[in-house]
């Protein structure tokens, strides 16, 4: 799949029954219930193999997580999808077992609202977390607000 193609995920109801397909980013932005898989590998000592997410991921970039994750394709079993992703992402093969399933809904770290005063303070303290162009825009907004008396 190239970057111009969208990845579809399987929408499910609360009982994991398929109810349709939707573009992955849209499912995440709208927090729609969809099928996803997390793979955890352990060595013979019981150590967990973790992976650090790429810094450029659209959510949770740079955070440590399980070995790999994926969304099964239509007509693909969870184990087939897991094995495929493990080979693709980690270059590994292993016998996998499906242990359990659960439902969760969490806000992603890349979609949030923040009050301007908190944003300005956060940029001052954590300037390395923000893109250079974004900091310049915030400065211009601040100047505009000062001139207009909005601050």
Image (cartoon, grey):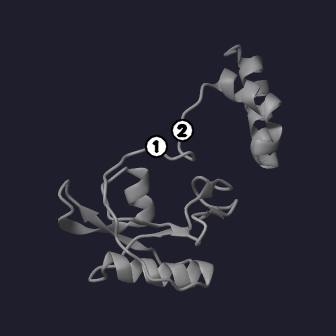
Q: Quadrant of residue 99?
A: bottom left
Residue at left offset 37%, top offset 50%: 30
Q: Position of residue 27 (x, y in %)?
A: 37, 58
From the viewer's perspective, tell me whether residue 72 is left or right of residue 125: left
- Whether residue 2 is visible here, answered yes or no, is no
Q: Does residue 25 lie above or below 120 as drawn?
A: below
Pointer 2 local density, CA inside 10 Å: few below 14, some 14–19, many at least 20: few
Q: Split into 4 quadrants, where in the image is the C terminus?
A: top right
Nearest to the eye among marks 2 and 1: give it: 1
Q: Does residue 32 lie above or below 50 as drawn?
A: above
User: Which mark identifies residue 43?
Assistant: none
58 or 61, which lies in front? 61
107 or 146, which lies in front? 107
Among numbered discs 2 and 1, the one appearing first in the sequence:
1
Q: Which residue is mark 2?
A: 112
Q: Does residue 98 lie above or below 109 as drawn?
A: below
Q: Secondary structure at mark 1?
A: loop
Q: Secondary structure at mark 2?
A: loop
User: Which mark identifies residue 107?
Assistant: 1
Marks 2,1: beta carbons within 8 A: yes
Q: Position of residue 123 (x, y in %)?
A: 77, 33
- Whether residue 70 is visible here, answered yes or no, is yes
Q: Position of residue 15 (x, y in %)?
A: 17, 58
2 or 126, which lies in front? 126
Q: Which residue is at the far front?
A: 45
The mark tally for this picture is 2
Between marks 2 and 1, how big is the CA–CA gap?
9 Å
Q: Does residue 107 lie above or below 124 as drawn?
A: below
Q: Quadrant of residue 113?
A: top right
Q: Position of residue 17 (x, y in %)?
A: 17, 65
From the viewer's perspective, tell me whether residue 132 is left or right of residue 50: right
Residue at left offset 67%, top offset 16%: 150
């Amino acid at each position: 799949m190239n970057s111009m193609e969208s990845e579809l995920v399987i929408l499910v109801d609360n009982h994991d029954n398929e109810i349709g397909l939707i573009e992955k980013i849209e499912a995440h932005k709208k927090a729609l219930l969809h099928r996803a898989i997390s793979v955890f590998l352990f060595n013979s000592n019981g150590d967990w193999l973790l992976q650090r997410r790429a810094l450029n991921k659209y959510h949770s970039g740079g955070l440590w997580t399980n070995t790999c994750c994926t969304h099964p394709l239509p007509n693909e079993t969870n184990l087939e999808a897991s094995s495929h992703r493990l080979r693709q992402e980690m270059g590994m093969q292993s016998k996998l077992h499906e242990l359990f399933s659960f439902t969760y809904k969490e806000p992603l770290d890349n979609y949030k609202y923040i009050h301007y005063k908190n944003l300005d303070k956060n940029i001052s303290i954590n300037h390395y977390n923000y893109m250079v162009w974004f900091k310049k825009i915030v400065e211009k907004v601040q100047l505009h607000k000062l001139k207009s008396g909005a601050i």
